[in-house]
Image (spheres, rainbow, N blue to C red):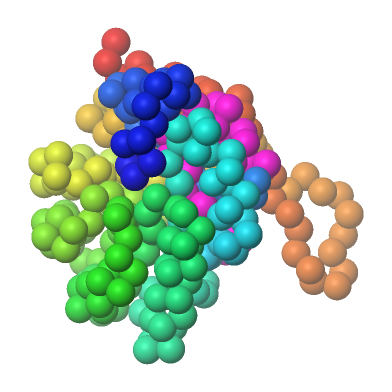
């Protein structure tokens, strides 16, 4: 990851590298408080979004800069979501142009990589994806759960590797990753170490060891208590939306322990 190369004798970075040797934990956050808790709990990498209630949209440059300010000293990489709207991933030309601008802004802020996907008609739209990639110039790219909408996610792994993708986030084509664990295992086998396959969607300390037992040692979670639902009792009559719970450091630590137990 980009900033690790210059980490030198930073003890936080050394600790982060040691954790990566045993397993990989990515925590998805949409706020600075969640980023603090992800780092304190032992995350290797942060996936930074906004609006997790909508599945995650592009974060602001201001949020990216604030999260980077706390992640860099801890040796924690940050990849930022590029998703210009909620819904499917069949972006039109205007939306692709917006995604390109968002990518440039986030890279200018200093993120280590980007998270993106374009899919239509049951397949990744590689011509559009590659044009975006070339325009962005990101050092690291995660193909996100757009891959869960394709007809052949296992076969798509080789295409992703050929396109320079170094990480794929997937639930194995299912709403919950635990139900797609066989597909995820097949994806990891197809990747052959050329691309990190990260299991995400409903991953928690209660099922993490099932992924590890299946050979999936890279996990992604929001680590929110109460399933991420708000505990607010105040009604929302004007429709501004209710805030979801932030990441829970205790849950992050429990996930860290499960991932690290992979080598015991």
In terms of depth relative to the viewer, which is nearer, 43 or 259?
Answer: 43
Quick check: can you spot residue 19?
no
Residue 163 visible here: yes
Q: Residue at x 37, y 89 (%)?
A: 93
Question: Is 87 placed left or right of 70 in the picture?
Answer: left
Q: Position of residue 16 (x, y in %)?
A: 41, 26
Q: Is residue 218 above or below residue 230?
A: above
Q: Quadrant of residue 208?
A: top left
Residue at image point 84% right, 64% down = 236
Between 146 and 176, the residue placed more toward the observer is: 146
Q: Is residue 27 left or right of residue 182?
A: right
Q: Quadrant of the C terminus?
A: top left
Q: Nearer the viewer, residue 85 or 8?
A: 8
What residue lies at 30% left-to-right and 22% top-to-bottom? Answer: 22
* Position of residue 156 measured from the top left corner of the image (x, y, whole percent): 17, 60
**In the depicted structure, whether residue 225 falls above or below residue 56:** above
**Magenta residue span:** 33-55
Give yes or no for residue 35 being in the magenta stretch. yes
Q: Position of residue 185 (x, y in %)?
A: 20, 40
Position of 182 with respect to 247 (left or right) is left
């Amino acid at each position: 990851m980009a900033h690790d190369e210059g980490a030198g004798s930073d003890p936080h970075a050394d600790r982060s590298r040691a954790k990566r040797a045993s397993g990989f934990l990515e925590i998805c956050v949409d706020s600075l408080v969640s980023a603090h808790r992800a780092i304190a709990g032992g995350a290797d990498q942060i996936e930074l979004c906004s609006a997790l209630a909508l599945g995650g949209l592009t974060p602001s440059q201001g949020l990216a800069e604030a999260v980077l300010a706390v992640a860099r000293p801890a040796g924690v990489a940050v990849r930022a979501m590029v998703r210009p709207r909620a819904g499917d991933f069949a972006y039109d030309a205007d939306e692709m142009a917006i995604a390109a601008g968002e990518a440039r802004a986030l890279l200018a802020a200093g993120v280590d990589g980007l998270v993106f996907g374009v899919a239509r008609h049951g397949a990744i739209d590689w011509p559009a994806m590659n044009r975006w990639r070339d325009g962005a110039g990101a050092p690291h790219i995660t193909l996100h759960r757009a891959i869960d909408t394709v007809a052949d996610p296992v076969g798509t792994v080789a295409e992703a590797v050929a396109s320079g993708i170094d990480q794929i986030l997937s639930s194995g084509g299912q709403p919950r990753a635990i139900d797609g664990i066989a597909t995820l295992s097949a994806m990891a086998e197809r990747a052959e170490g050329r691309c990190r396959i990260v299991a995400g969607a409903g991953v928690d300390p209660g099922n993490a060891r099932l992924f590890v037992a299946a050979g999936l040692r890279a996990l992604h979670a929001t680590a929110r208590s109460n399933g991420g639902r708000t505990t607010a009792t105040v009604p929302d009559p004007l429709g501004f939306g209710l805030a979801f719970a932030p990441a829970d450091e205790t849950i992050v630590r429990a996930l860290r322990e499960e991932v690290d137990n992979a080598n015991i």
